[in-house]
Image: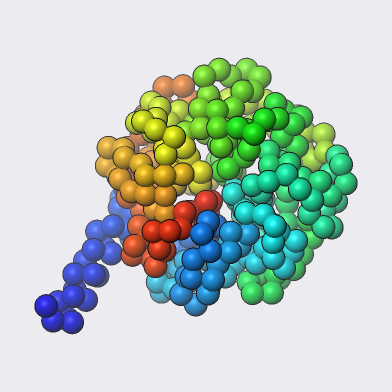
Amino acid sequence: MTRATTSLRVNLLRALTNDTSGGTPPLSGKVLVSVLGSPTLGAAGVVADEDIAQYDGATGTWSLYFDGSDVGLASYAVDAFAVLPGGDILISIDLDGTVAGLTGGPSGTSVDDSDIIRFTPTSLGATTAGTWSFYFDGSDVGLTTTAEDIDAISILPSGAIGISTLGDPSVTGLAGLADEDVIAFSAGGLGSVTSGTYAYYFDGSDVGLSTSTNEDIDALDAATGNILTLSTIGAYSVTGATGTDEDAFKATVTTIGTNTAATFATFFEAALRGIPTTANINAIHLLP
């Protein structure tokens, strides 16, 4: 096979595997991910599990977006994050611990894996700097067990916080929740005294994400209309998309809540973006 033929086939495959669900054009924006496994991602270099990397769809290149070791996260993995419109980053970490410089928390600098903290950057990239503040106290609103470790977050179009957890959560007002679900938290108060209510948002078992623990949602972007970008803790298979833990796919949701209905399409195939099979997309956020 000639080099020209190989290049043509690769370009065709890239075109076919970009997001085309709902008439969306091929990937041209930027995709932020945290990745377990410390892979080397192009110009970003080695991306540790406390970092966030950026993939530029227009150029097909990687860069480092957030260096967690610069700001006190070297002992943790970023297992959920969302970027707010002003540039602040909401982050949940995988272990209970302390984050130096954190203000506003109920217990000083202590953080639980069911909490969310807010990073306000003064610089990003290879030299990350900024300040930490406490954002969401999970224990105030029923997230108290190991299974209720927050492992995916996104700000929903309504302004509520979309949350998925490591295991099956149990919160006031909802029953039968599982780790492939997304719940919507509408805050009455945030910070060290968090209050609010939960509602069903996305029931994964309604749309085929329930065949095994591999289909636990561990990465979520739900900020754009009715389209969710998802990744799972292991291999997944739904109508319209199959992949592994280092891939991401899209769900175009036609009905939210306890009777969720959606269609699926492949979106971000790791093999085409240089993510090795030893890695796992642990969180995802789409930039314009």
Residue 161: percent from the left, percent from the top? Answer: 62, 38
Q: Name the one closer to the observer, 127 or 1.
A: 1
Q: Quadrant of residue 34?
A: bottom right
Residue 214: percent from the left, percent from the top? Answer: 42, 39
Q: How is the image coloured?
A: rainbow
Q: Name the one closer to the observer, 105 or 40.
A: 40
Asked whether residue 84 appears in the rendered view, the answer is no
Relative to 278, is 122 above or below? below
Q: Quadrant of residue 2?
A: bottom left
Relative to 177, is 79 above or below? below
Relative to residue 192, is residue 35 drawn left or right?
A: left
Residue 281: percent from the left, percent from the top? Answer: 48, 54
Relative to residue 239, is residue 173 drawn left or right?
A: right
Q: Which quadrant of the rendered structure holds the N terminus?
A: bottom left
Numbered disc total:
0
> Residue at position x 41%, y 74% from top?
59
> Residue at position x 63%, y 59% from top?
50
Residue farthest right in this picture = 108
> Residue at position x 58%, y 64% from top?
48
Relative to residue 117, is residue 169 drawn left or right?
A: left
Residue 262: percent from the left, percent from the top? Answer: 36, 34
Asked whether residue 109 appears in the rendered view, the answer is yes
Residue farthest left in this picture = 1
> Residue at position x 74%, y 31% from top?
139
